[in-house]
Amino acid sequence: KAGVTQTPRYLIKTRGQQVTLSCSPISGHRSVSWYQQTPGQGLQFLFEYFSETQRNKGNFPGRFSGRQFSNSRSEMNVSTLELGDSALYLCASSLPQSSGNTIYFGEGSWLTVV
Amino acid sequence: EDQVTQSPEALRLQEGESSSLNCSYTVSGLRGLFWYRQDPGKGPEFLFTLYSAGEEKEKERLKATLTKKESFLHITAPKPEDSATYLCAVPGGGSEKLVFGKGTKLTVNP
């Protein structure tokens, strides 16, 4: 059974540019969430999607956005990149049941903003 | 506000030297406590979910336990390959959102 797949794995962008990251959840998982991981702040929740609807959003500026498609794939976008956006962006998926389900993570996308 | 605190931040052990990692949590209505292992440059790998106080789960040299206020990850006779950062998390906000601790970086020396 394939795990959570994220692309690209590594990317370098320039300040002011925008970036789109992709995530394919585990087959059958309809809930997809995104996290940002930095050495200083640890893992922080960005947003969660279920059935193409954003169910929850973390405390990040509006430059961070996402969407989910009908096949449960998800993308997140960061516009007007800042140096502080350099981080590991992790996608996670889980079964569409009540909260408390096991959440599985992908390998992440390493974003470096220069 | 939901909160997770892990201690110690870093732990160095000799191979075979058993120890425990701590995860204390504050959450309204616990709906599970998760333990993950994360290797450098990789995503968190799921280890255990605990749902109620008194519950225990084991996997190889790892055993996780849960009380009403904290969880412990016991590592028995660790090996160098157990070196990783161990993360603890709880669902918060009534959704799939996970609130993570900052992790414990474990180093096991041969």
Image (cartoon, coloured by chain):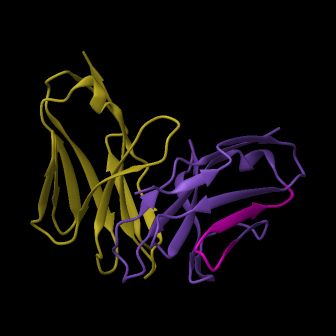
Residue A25 highlighted magenta (yes or no)? no
Q: Position of residue A14 (x, y in %)?
A: 87, 43
- Where is residue A109 shown, x and y percent of the image? 63, 47
Front one among A114 and A96 = A96
**Residue at left offset 35%, top offset 66%:** A102
The chain letter corresponding to purple is A
In the image, residue A39 lies at what x, y percent? Answer: 56, 41
Residue drawn where x is 18% and y is 69% of the image: B68
Q: Which image quadrant for residue A2?
A: bottom left
Please, is residue A90 above or below residue B13 in the view? below
Instruction: Please give left or right for residue A79 compared with residue A98 in the image.
Output: right
Q: Residue at x 20, y 51 (%)?
A: B72
Q: Is residue A16 left or right of residue B53?
A: right
Quarter assignment of residue B80? top left
Q: How many marks?
A: 0
Q: According to the rendering, which colour does chain B have?
A: yellow
Report which quarter residue A76 is drawn in. bottom right
Residue lying farthest front? A1
Write down the region rendered in magenta. Answer: A67-80
Q: Is residue B56 left or right of residue B92?
A: left
Seen as rendered, the residue at the extreme left is B54
Quadrant where the C terminus of chain B sits is top left
Question: In the rendering, at what x and y percent does residue A9 appear?
Answer: 64, 43
